[in-house]
Amino acid sequence: MVEPLLELRHLKKNFGALVVTDDVSLAVEPGELHAIIGPNGAGKTTLIHQISGFLSSASGEVLLGGQDITRLSMHERVRRGLARSFQITSILPGFSALENVALAVQARSGSSFRFFGDASRERGLNELAMDCLEQVGLGDRAFATAGFLSHGEKRQLELAIALATRPRLLLLDEPLAGTGHDDSQRVVETLRALKSRITIVLIEHDMDAVFSLADRVSVLVYGRVIATDTPVAIRANAEVRTAYLGEEV
Ligand SMILES: Nc1ncnc2c1ncn2[C@@H]1O[C@H](COP(=O)(O)OP(=O)(O)OP(=O)(O)O)[C@@H](O)[C@H]1O
């Protein structure tokens, strides 16, 4: 059996008396797009926070490439290859798409922000940033001002910024949120192209997108994983249908 790139073992998180994730165990294989779905309040975002290190866990373990990262800081987890997409609010609207990614590349490489004004001139920076933009299909918009990009393009830019840290694993929390039909198609096609190159954990409410993109799906209900399987098997799973998806699926 292939060693999982990400493994969660009996993870738990509570806020006081409220247990939000409970005994969550799952394995994400290298190269797969693993979707985590579940009703509102099931604990999906909390779980992503536990994986990224934004929240500590009450108990359980997080392993990346077989190494225990449970107690590591977010920064250290990023250094080891874990990235989550930034929110649109973290995009600098007055800078070009390329400059936004260049700054993220620069931050990763540890350059000081006193080079801020020279960011676009730093050696190799533009090439690396352009590579990230091309990976998300935004190469032709490199010089557009970020604030004027469409909503879907901003989502693509977030992905490019996340790629700037050269991650092994990308955590995406609702990348389609707030997108209209055309924008959502753009982002879905971007994710489809990306998934062949990088392992992705995706939380998403858009079931059409989930079932067309995911290699496997885990279903979280009241903080517990009730099933992990292929999209076809998940659709047919009686417990999942009853607990969450409903007959429309
Ligand atoms: N910092 C916090 N303090 C207290 N309760 C919290 C906190 N963060 C989340 N919760 C609660 O934990 C539960 C799970 O929240 P979470 O956001 O992880 O769910 P979710 O599955 O991502 O939901 P959605 O699909 O609506 O985004 C909710 O009941 C939420 O109110």
Image (tube, helix red, strand yellow):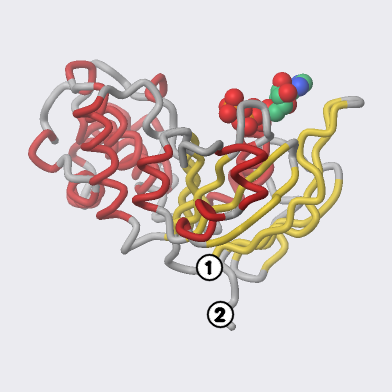
The image position of residue 28, as x and y in percent, is 56, 62
Q: Nearer the viewer, residue 1 or 221?
A: 221
Residue pointed to by mark 1: 29
- Looking at the image, which residue is at 25% across and 48% down? 132
State the SS at label 2. Answer: loop
Q: Would residue 46 be seen by someone viewing this image from the given angle?
A: yes
Are the residues tagged 2 and 1 within 8 Å (C-beta)? Answer: yes
Q: Looking at the image, which residue sits at the far front? A: 247
- Which residue is at the front of the view, 80 or 55? 55
Q: Quadrant of the N terminus?
A: bottom right
Q: In this picture, is 219 found above or below 97?
A: below
Which residue is at the front of the view, 6 or 224?
224
Q: Is mark 2 within 8 Å of ligand 1?
A: no
Left or right: residue 142 compared with residue 213:
left
Residue 188, label in figure: none
Note whether residue 74 is visible: no
Left or right: where 171 falls relative to 54: left
In three-dimensional space, the C-alpha distance between marks 2 and 1, rounded to whole angstroms, equals 7 Å
- Residue sitting at x 32%, y 29%: 116
Q: Residues within 10 Å of mark 2 (few under 14, many from 20)?
A: few
What residue would you read off at disc 2? 2
In the image, what residue occupies the spot 46% across and 56% down? 231
- For marks 2 and 1, the one nearer the N-term is 2
Q: Nearer the viewer, residue 241 or 37?
A: 241
Q: Amino acid at mark 2?
A: Val
Q: Residue at x 77, y 57 (%)?
A: 61
Q: Amino acid at mark 1?
A: Glu
